[in-house]
Amino acid sequence: MLTATRVRAPSSLQWISLFTAAFLVLPTAYIVYVAMTAAPAVWARLWSTRIPELLGNTLSLALGVALITLVLGVSLAWITVRYDFPGRRIWEWALALPLAMPTYVLAYVYAHLLGMGGPTEQWWQLLFGHEARLPSPQSFPGVTMIMALDTFPFVYLLVRSALQNLNVSFEEVARACGVSPWATLRRVTLPLIRPAIAAGLALVILYVISDFGAVSLLRYQTLTYAVYQQMTSRYDHTAASILSLLLVVMAIIFLVTERWFRQRSRFYQTSGRYRRSTRQHAGPLGTALITSYVVLVFGAAFGIPAAMLIQWSVEAISQGALDTRFLGFIWNSGFLAALAACGAVIIGLPLAYLASRRPSRLNIACLQAAYAGYALPGPVAALAVLVLFTHFAPALYGTVVVLIIAYILHFLPVGLQSMEPALQQVTPNVEEVARTLGCTTHQSLWRVTLPLVRNGFVAAWVLMFLQTMKELPATLLLRPVGFDTLAIRVWLEASEEYYQLAAPAALLIVILSLPALMLLVSKDWRGEAQKGVT
């Protein structure tokens, strides 16, 4: 007698995740379609003229920045978590401040300081003669260092959170078995925090390959900058789509690699044996070395640029450059960033939850689809969103709704890199206990899981808010007529080398980002609710 096999119907969360992923992947699908249907002559022309150079520049820049951020982020996180030294509490949050500094602001500040005839070169020539020259900030080392100084907090914050959550009992067991401190670091500590390192580096690499502001101001030829040139100078959307397809392929390779590292490093911490590490007291020599290192990195990444912005802003304000229009710029920037961050957290929740708790091929594919928008350059992502809305929702054309959706599409992966690890560090046993006590899946998610991962979700919201506040290319192309943000004002003035006039708007971006950063770094990422449960 044959028995019918009962097929489990998809849950409401799975339907929401599927429709969300389909919507998020539409712009990328449009770019792929345009690129794959392009004439072979267009492909041949690009391969013979531009693509080899652009690929080499983009890959070398991404890998160079990733290497520097790996060293800076891991070392600074280790110092602030494992050592006690004067001013440690201040440096813990101060080292996150570069996230408030847009890369294009950092680029134009260092273009002035290190450029030909700038203050640094004048000082250098006084020491070594009039023929002495400094490396140009528009060279590969200059662009790499500028972008690394702006992006190392991605690695620093995630690794710092992982080190704070780390159960030091694992290290103590290794030491009790006779393992040396360096071997314990290599064989125990680093493998346990490897998911955070991989997530931070993935954010850095995706940010670098899709960055537009810094590379355009420094005239460094990458795929993203070439895409913008094709769209605005030559109006060649087909060539722009072909170059964008290469970026998508690069992003997929990096994301698959990061996923492989994370899957090899999944673990849950137990409650009974959990212990935090105790900070070591640095002696006089150690304190001097640590403080010098931290001050050097902070000064280069935030202190010097902020001082220049303040100086230029004072000069611009004395000339009457700051008027009532800036109130509108502030409102536009903050309101859009907050709405986009809230929308991204709501949309990303079912994607991250299902990929963590029910890692089927479908759920993993839905999560990976959400990363598609981050691989697209801002101009092309904006163009794809605009085309989709003009075809399917023309009534929304020219409104901020299109702009907010473009923000969510582009920056949702930033939040997912924090939301998914937060869910993975909460053992599914607590949800199973809740369901045995009569809670439905939705009730256990709302009453048990979300309170345990709220700190990770706050981090996701803050990271997306900061990124949206600084976003430039999509805003340039999609903003309604007469709708300017602080980032737009910075770009309009800095692109013409009116650094003093650009400084007030740039400084306001930094100031508005500070409360969100304070919230981000002031959290104890393990949380009181999570202690004793995970």
Image (cartoon, grey):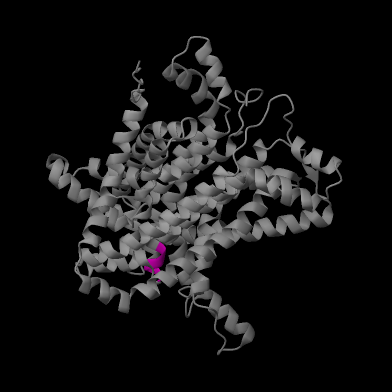
Q: Position of residue 376 (x, y in %)?
A: 34, 55
Left or right of 449 in this view: 273:
right
Residue at figure coordinates x 13%, y 46% from the top left: 391
Residue at figure coordinates x 33%, y 63% from the top left: 493
Secondary structure that dominates the magenta span = helix
Left or right of 327 in this view: 530:
right
Q: Quadrant of the N terminus?
A: top left
Residue nearer the viewer, 58 or 324:
58
The answer to whether residue 318 is seen in the rendering is no
Q: Is residue 217 magenta?
A: yes
Q: Is residue 506 magenta?
A: no
> Is residue 282 shown above or below 503?
above
> Is residue 410 shown above or below 109?
above
Residue at figure coordinates x 60%, y 83% from the top left: 126
Residue nearer the viewer, 134 or 189:
189
Q: Position of residue 355 (x, y in %)?
A: 45, 35
Q: Quadrant of residue 41?
A: bottom left
Left or right of 462 in this view: 523:
right
The answer to whether residue 371 is seen in the rendering is yes
> Is residue 264 shown above or below 126?
above
- Magenta-tinted stretch: 214-218
Q: Quadrant of residue 234?
A: bottom left
Q: Quadrant of the C terminus?
A: top right
Residue nearer the viewer, 309 or 399:
399
Q: How many discs appear?
A: 0
> Is residue 466 shown above or below 205?
above
